[in-house]
Image (spheres, helix red, strand yellow):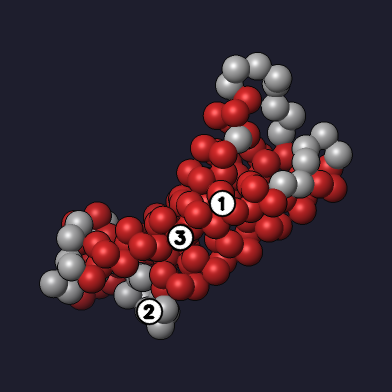
Amino acid sequence: MEAEGVCIRKMKKLIFAVVLFLAIHTILFIGATARVPDNGLRDFIAGNYAHFIAFFCVAASASLILLHERIRARFPLIISFLYSSFLTFIVELVQKLIGYRTFSEKDILIGVLGAVTYTIFAAILLRFKIGLRFFNIFTKIKK
């Protein structure tokens, strides 16, 4: 009976990580396709900060799924970085196609920088076993 409880707890962690991943992507695509008012918040809502934070979060949510003990991807941080970088390009392409948003190489670079920052940050935390309590919310990483 105890093993069943452990299995359910593991699946709850994976389901939570997947829901987080989907929520971040929903917010990203709504924000990427929304009309942005031309006011003082424009730079924060659709500018460099938004691209950096969005793709930092995309890489983080992808890696939390890939780090889960049920998934056990070989190179979770590299895969999540590549996915986030690819998604940066896709978002900019979508913005070009919808007309009222623009394609910007600078936005792609800032999005990739967000993904790189998360990847380095997570690699350091995992390498030196710092912050395992955070990662263990989603998966079990041994000390």
**Labelled pair 2, 3 in contact (Cβ < 8 Å):** no
Q: Which residue is mark 2?
A: 72
Q: Earlier in the sequence, mark 3 or mark 1?
A: 1
Does dot 1 land on a helix, a strand or a loop?
helix
User: Taking 33 as reference, is 139 left or right?
Assistant: left
Q: Which residue is mark 3?
A: 116
Please name the residue shown 32% across and 58% down the image: 121
Q: Earlier in the sequence, mark 1 or mark 2?
A: 2
Q: Quadrant of the N terminus?
A: bottom left
User: Which percent across, then down, holds residue 8?
Assistant: 30, 66
Q: Amino acid at mark 2?
A: Arg
Does dot 2 land on a helix, a strand or a loop?
loop
Whole-angstrom CA distance, mark 3 to mark 1, is 9 Å
Q: Residue furthest bottom?
A: 74
Please name the residue shown 78% across and 41% down the image: 102
**Labelled pair 1, 2 in contact (Cβ < 8 Å):** no
Q: Is residue 128 above or below residue 45?
A: below
Q: Amino acid at mark 3?
A: Val
Please name the residue shown 70% across and 27% down the image: 36
When asked about the image quadrant of residue 40, the answer is: top right
User: Which percent across, then down, holds residue 53?
Assistant: 48, 44
Q: Earlier in the sequence, mark 2 or mark 3?
A: 2
Q: Amino acid at mark 1?
A: Gly
Q: Quadrant of the C terminus?
A: bottom left
Q: Nearer the viewer, mark 1 or mark 2?
A: 1
Mark carried by residue 111: 1
